[in-house]
Image (cartoon, rainbow, N blue to C red):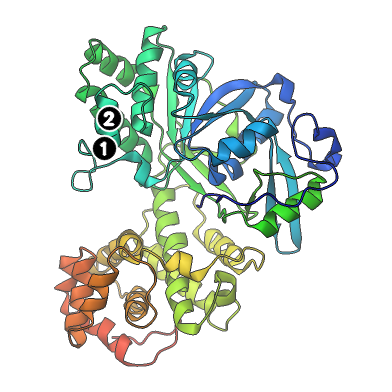
Amino acid sequence: MSATPRHQAAPAPAGGRLSAATLRAVPAGSRPATDRGALRPRIVHLGIGAFHRAHQAVCTELAEVSAAGGWGIAGVTQRSRAVVDALRPQDGLYSLTERHPDGPVTRVIGTVTEVLHAADDGARLTELLASPDVTVVTLTVTEKGYRRDPATGGLDPADPLIRGDLAGATAPASAVGQLAYGLRARLRSGGAPLSVVSCDNMAGNGAVLRRLVREFLAATGWAERERLLEWTAASVAFPSTVVDRIVPATTEADLRTAARALTLRDEGAVTAEPFTQWVLEDAFAADRPRWEAGGARFVADVAPYQLTKLRLLNGSHSLLAYLGLAAGCGTVADAMATGWGEDAVRAFCAEAAASLPPADGLDIPGYVDSLVRRFANPAMHHRIRQIAADGSLKIPERWLAPLRELRATGHDTPHLTAALAAWARATRDTPAEDPAADELRRAWERPGPDAVRTLLLLLGAEDLAEDTALVKAVDRELRSPTTPVAPRRH
């Protein structure tokens, strides 16, 4: 997922700017599906960027249409004022343009009832988190926003924002701090149950967030700390989720597309692919929207869905990126339009799927078919270099985990091996942005298999670096021309 960048205002259409006052100028078929007057803030969302506005907010609107509950969203931006500046003058209204292969479809989303800045509007945020009318908090603050210690996976006590919040900040600056302060205010005001729902791309995101909040509370000097920890354990739920939708950064062309469809300028416009997925652990502590009416799925355990997304979607996405770099492709759709793109995705997924645990309701062949359609959508313009960036951080979960598991059980892994070679080749020939770029480059000062071992060590894969058969297989792929879909058997 990606955030909408700052942009200059698009040329103003004759009707002016989108807002509650100008909404009647929008063509009837593109207006919000909900009765805006019936909404009130019942959800607080931390991190109201493009992804939330194209995903959970849309699902909430569809849920409200099906079963009215007044489910409005108070959206909170953590740092930049760009979203506040874009949406507040528009009364929270914005448009979503879905990029269908046969043309864009634009409509206004009306579920955001107010927009806050965490620092400037800290008192209002705490007030909402304490209100019994708010029964759900959702988050999309990116993985970095959780302020985790990379060594332990828990709260990072050395993080400047965490230190400041624990010291008694007037307006907490971290998402975890905001939740903790809000929970204290909620307990003081009566202790109504609450569900806190992480929608960020982390395995077991609910359990992760629960741990971070508890560690923050335990580190405070608050007089009610022990009571707060007990109440949180009993009355606050942290369901895990899996979210999926490609939401590219909004461009000037996207703003013009929205303006033409609405007959109004929209400074908060977002765009997305037609596909969307939201899987939630059915473990809520309080009332929630009927998100299932908007296409969400509630399950007892999201882990199989998380692994499927990580290993099939994210894994094949990375594969296309590194193969595409070598082939001179600019976008994912360009790679899919080659003679090898679709076959590469299907072959990779067939191999990686053998590492997935069985799960009721998961249709793997259907899932792979949907990936092929999504990746081939020429309207998305998803850049290869964007996906190839930060490979040293992405590849361990996407490729190395299934590679280990399959090799440990005696499975042949030609496509995962070829994928690893494609990434290695890219670090040598067409390097993308990466925090370990210098170390990756220096690895190639070593000869043949030693370079491969060094690359694996940089990925934190000491065990695979000692797998002589794998290292030799990757080295052979690197030294001999091969096709992306037909790696040689080793």
User: Residue 196 at what x, y percent from top left?
Assistant: 42, 28
Left or right, residue 342 beside residue 126: right
Quarter of the figure that contains the C terminus:
bottom left
Q: Tell me which residue sits at (57%, 56%) in the image.
A: 248
The residue that mark 1 highlights is: 160
> Foreground residue, 334 or 313?
334
Q: Is residue 446 above or below residue 283?
A: below
Q: Which class describes the residues within 10 Å of circle 2: few (<14), some (14-19), or many (20+)?
A: some
Q: Which residue is mark 2?
A: 164
Q: Can residue 56 be seen?
A: no
Of 480 and 441, which appears nearest the observer? 441
Which residue sits at x=41%, y=48%? 201
The residue positioned 26% from the left and 37% from the top of the image is 160
Label 2, secondary structure: give it.
helix
Give above or below for 399 relative to 259: below
Q: Circle 1 sits in a helix, a strand or a loop, which is it?
A: helix
User: What distance separates the C-alpha of mark 1 from that of mark 2?
Assistant: 6 Å
Question: Which residue is more in the foreground, 399 or 411?
Answer: 399
Q: Residue at x 39, y 53 (%)?
A: 307
Image-based side of 253 in relation to 177, left or right: right
**Percent position (x, y) of residue 315?**
41, 64
Mark 2: which amino acid? Answer: Gly
* Residue type highlighted by circle 1: Pro
Q: Is residue 460 visible?
A: yes
Q: Position of residue 213 (x, y in %)?
A: 30, 29
Dot 1: few (<14), some (14–19), or many (≥20) neighbours within 10 Å? few
Q: Are marks 1 and 2 in contact (CB under 8 Å)?
A: yes
